[in-house]
Image: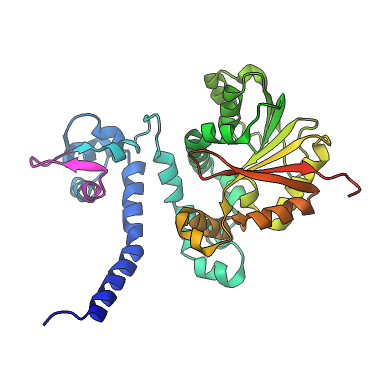
Amino acid sequence: MTDSPTTRLATDDQTYVLRLLFGFFGAQAMQAFASLGFADHLGDKPRSAEEVAAATDCDAPSTYRLLRLAAVLRLVEAHGDGTFTLAPAGALLASDHPNSLRDIVRFFAGREQWLSWAELDTAVKTGDPTVDQVLGKSFFPYLAEHPERSQVFNSAMTGFTRLDGPGIAAGADLSSFTSIVDVGGGNGALLAACLQANPSLRGELLDSEKGLGEAEAVLQAAGVRDRVTLTAGDFFVSVPQGHDAYMLKSIIHDWDDEKSRLILSTCREAMRPDSTLLVVEPVVADDPAAWSEAPALLMSDLNMLVMTGGKERTASEFEALLSSAGFRLEGIVSCPGTGFQIIRGKPQPQDA
């Protein structure tokens, strides 16, 4: 007796749902692989599970079991003699890889994210972030009290900027500007990419004192330190005045409309009438047919819900938000090779 088409379809659907359900097992295995430093200790020659366990102070049988799954996940290659070597994907989890994703994995598969996502149903019911109830306080104050996790978070954000910075610098088209301030720009990795692409451009980097902690080294390494002013501050209160351009990357999506409006209004107060606002964010499509082209963006949207109370926005939502803060939407352009767009705005006359 063979399965009917209806039975076969149901089986396929069940398999699909279960694959979605158990996907987090693989993510957590990758997190453990990264956090325990397996990629750093596998190196460039075959090693046994016992050798990896000894180098990482882990239980040898459990190390073997994790390496066995890592082989299925294509992080390592398993050999018939019981040894393992690092695969190209696994090499990206080494701390010294030039394009390392280690801290991105360590943060997004870390306890802050996972505990908050476990309460997604609560967030959907209430419309409020769940991070407060699982961590005892909101996300950014939590990071301020946990410097080790703050370092992982900042490193993860730098990792994304390393991937996307050149494309953002190209999409922003900064050639007509002589000065730019990166609002909430962290260690300056994106500002450095912008200055490297525009040799006559000068910049100012605004963030908290802790946020600027690694900026000196990052800007020196990029060869642009002499063109950057470092300013410690709070973008809810004030931002540097009189620049040609004001750039905010991955800032607005962290906040709800009220707080986003406050940030943008603070920028508006500091800008000249001819200054330009550059909001660097992905833009959610209004057309449902396009949603499947960017599933990660819709996941990020829910991540903002549980972690910060922010959200990803559509073009019309950005236009309304900018207008409410005193800006006219000038246009939205894509950044090549990235998932980001530049939402360009111009200050409206104060009496408009």
The residue positioned 72% from the left and 41% from the top of the image is: 235
The residue positioned 61% from the left and 30% from the top of the image is: 191
Is 152 situated left or right of 259 in this image?
left
Q: Which residues are magenta?
A: 69-84
Which of the two residues, 137 or 239, is positioned nearer the viewer here? Answer: 239
Is 45 situated left or right of 248 in this image?
left
Q: Is residue 152 visible?
A: yes
**Residue 255 spot, x, y in % from top left:** 65, 53
* Residue that extends furthest to the left in the rendered view of this protein: 81
Is 226 situated left or right of 8 in this image?
right
Q: Quadrant of the N terminus?
A: bottom left
Q: Is residue 116 visible?
A: no
Which of the two residues, 155 or 151, is positioned nearer the viewer here? Answer: 155
Residue 76 part of the magenta-drawn span? yes
Q: Indicate whether 180 appears above or below 125.
A: above
Q: Quadrant of residue 203?
A: top right
